[in-house]
Image (tube, grey):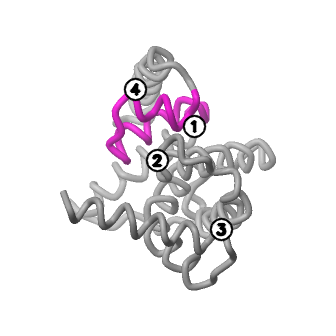
Amino acid sequence: MVQSNSIATDLEQILAGSRDGDRLAQSKLYERFQRSVYGLAVRMVGRCEADDLTQEIFLRVFAGLGSFRGTAGFSTWLYRVAINECLRYRRARRPMGDARGCEPEAQEGTVGRRLEQAEALEHALQRLDPPLRAVFLLRHSEGMDYKRISAVLGIPISTAATRLGRARAELQRLLKGIGF
C-alpha cells in the first residue's frame, strides 16, 4: 500500500511540475504515459500518423493541465484528451485512405499468417465508426472496465456496453468480409 501511495505522490509531483512548465517533469510525464497514448493512437488513426499525433496529444495535455481538476484519475483524463484528439484528427482527415499503406508486407509461413491476421484486424478497426473503435480499444487494448470507459468517454455505462457490443458485431462482419 505504501508503494502505490508513493507512486501517487510521485505522479502528483510530476503533474505539479508539468503545470509549472518544468521540462524535466514534463519529460517524466511523457515517458510514463507515452507508450499507452501511442498504442491508442496507432489503433485509432493508424501507424503512419501515430507518432505525430502522440506528440500533438501531449502538447494538448501540457497546455491543458491547468484544467485538470483531479476529480477523476489523471490517466482517465489523459485518455479522454487522447481519444478526443484522435477523433478530431480523423474528422479533419476524412476520407481516410488505407491505414495499412505504410505497414510492412506480411512474411511467409506461420509468422506471416499471424501478421496478416493482425493487419486484417487493424484494417477492420480503422473501418469502425470512431466512437465504437474507442470503446473497443479501451476495453480490449487498455483493459478498462465499463465504469472507467464511461468516465473516459463521458458516456453512461449502458452506452459503453451497447457500443462495445456493436463494435464486436461490426468487427466480426468486417473480418468475415475479408475472409478471416
Q: Which residue is mark 4?
A: 168
The residue carrying mark 1 is 127
Tag 4: residue type? Arg
Task: Read off the magenta span.
Answer: 127-154
Q: Residue furthest bottom?
A: 24
Quarter of the picture containing the N terminus is bottom left
Say which of 178 and 161 sits in front: 161
Camera-nearest residue between 130 and 12: 12
| Label 1 SS | helix
In this view, the mark in front (3 or 1): 3
Q: Amino acid at mark 3?
A: Arg
For residue 73, the mark is 2
Res 164 → quadrant: top left
Given contact means CB atoms under 8 Å apart, are the residues at marks 3 and 1 in contact? no
Indicate the position of residue 8 as horizontal and vertical percent values: 37, 61
Which residue is at a point 63% across and 65% down the rendered structure image?
58
Q: Residues within 10 Å of mark 4 (few under 14, many from 20)?
A: some
Q: Position of residue 152 (x, y in %)?
A: 52, 38
Callout 2: SS? loop
Front residue of 126/27: it is: 27
Q: Is residue 25 above or below residue 58?
A: below
- What distance separates the C-alpha of mark 3 from that of mark 1? 37 Å
Query: Depth-wise, is mark 4 or mark 1 nearer the camera?
Result: 4
Say if 39 sits above or below 19 in the image: above
> In screen coordinates, is 156 left or right of 139?
right
Q: Are marks 4 and 1 in contact (CB under 8 Å)?
A: no
Q: CA distance from mark 1 to mark 2?
A: 30 Å
Q: Secondary structure at mark 3?
A: helix
**What is the distance, in whole Å, between disc 2 and disc 4 at their CAs?**
27 Å
Of callouts 4 and 1, the N-terminal one: 1
